[in-house]
Image (cartoon, rainbow, N blue to C red):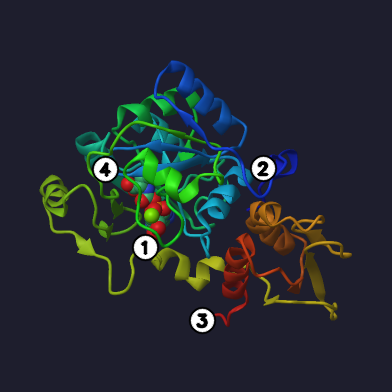
Amino acid sequence: MLLSNKNAASLKPLPEPAVKTEFLSPDAPGLARAAALLSDGALVAFPTETVYGLGGDARNDMAVARIFEAKGRPRFNPLIVHVDSIETAKRYVEWTDMADRLASAFWPGPLTLVLPIRPDAGLSPLVTADLPTLAIRVPAHPVARALLAAFDGPVAAPSANPSGKISPTTAAHVAAGLSGRIAAVVDGGACDVGLESTILGLAETPTLLRPGGLPQEALEAALGAPLALHGAGDPLSAPGQMTSHYAPGAPVRLNATDLRPGEKLLGFGKVDAAMNLSPSGDLTEAAANLFHHLHAMDALGAEVIAVSPIPDHGLGRAINDRLRRAAAPRP
Ligand code: TXA
Ligand code: MG
């Protein structure tokens, strides 16, 4: 799968180190401003009925890279995409009868469905961390719905807190954690549910991947059967730990400062390379390019993909986490 990368190439990174975070009212001018910022690839926090989300255009590689950067996430966990309706969701995932039954019963609301992503979805591979499935939901909060209508596109949004901190349920919480790191926050008051959405995997046997705002009992009543529960360990990080989903076809050698026979170089910074994650050494650009370039290196027929050293700070930590998985011994 070789995807085009025009978004990454056409967008400049936001000014470093800080932006002035705008506080927007959930009225027509505020929502129009928020939608315009999203269209520009900037980040906008907004209320959902569960928690505040940190939104970015799910089709835009740089916007999605900025989400990870703003949160300081040490790895590329897959993100939930927010859309306005079942009809829109069908553009992005392979819809099933069971998805239809559950979505009809619980959307809009605090339920996220994980389904196979459609090949023509057109989303940044950073959204799914290059997994073959997509987490998607239709939020119920009127401000989230109004923003999705104004933007008219898919919004990738994790909870709007720095990585490792608790999820925000007011605009003030968002500002406390992310002020200066995101373009705007739409103030829609306190969230009703105050707990993240329930995540249900439907790609295979219906599996509860994360308990959340929609009770398990309600889902089981609608399904007419008990749910499989995700196994031991942290269900949230599980998708990011499946090494097999992360490996390109060719073996990967990290921290390459020379080139050995059969190798092609995936560069970073000023190096002579078959492909370069960011010739200028910009980590946001490198993150935006990462999955596209790994696929492309495979397509170039590299026997071994050698990768330049990537600085291990900021987004570089998530990039290195991903690359270490790609380079890990294969099962
Ligand atoms: O209520 C919510 O769900 C909030 C609001 C903003 O919608 N969002 C939220 O996102 O909690 P986040 O990023 O904090 O948690 C999303 C989790 C990820 O950690 C990941 O484990 C799971 O969703 N996830 C996303 N895509 C997945 C996939 N394709 N397969 C399995 N799990 C996935
Ligand atoms: Mg979270």
User: Which residue is at 80% across, 69% downward?
Assistant: 265
Question: Where in the figure is residue 109, as x and y percent of width and height?
Answer: 26, 38
User: At numbered mark 1, what does the secondary structure look like: helix, strand or loop?
Assistant: loop
Q: Is the residue at mark 1 in contact range of ligand 1, meaning its CB lies under 8 Å from it?
A: yes
Q: Which amino acid does label 1 sit on?
A: Leu
Seen as rendered, the residue at the extreme right is 272
The residues bearing labels 3 and 2 have C-alpha atoms spaced at a distance of 40 Å
Q: Which of 126 and 53 is in front in this view?
A: 53
Q: What residue type is labelled 4?
A: Pro
Comparing marks 3 and 2, which lies closer to the viewer?
2
Disc with the residue nearer the chain's start (1 vs 4): 4
The residues bearing labels 1 and 4 have C-alpha atoms spaced at a distance of 16 Å
The quarter of the displayed image where residue 59 is located: top right
Disc with the residue nearer the chain's start (4 vs 3): 4
Q: What residue type is labelled 3?
A: Pro
Question: Where in the figure is residue 99, as x and y percent of width and height?
Answer: 29, 43
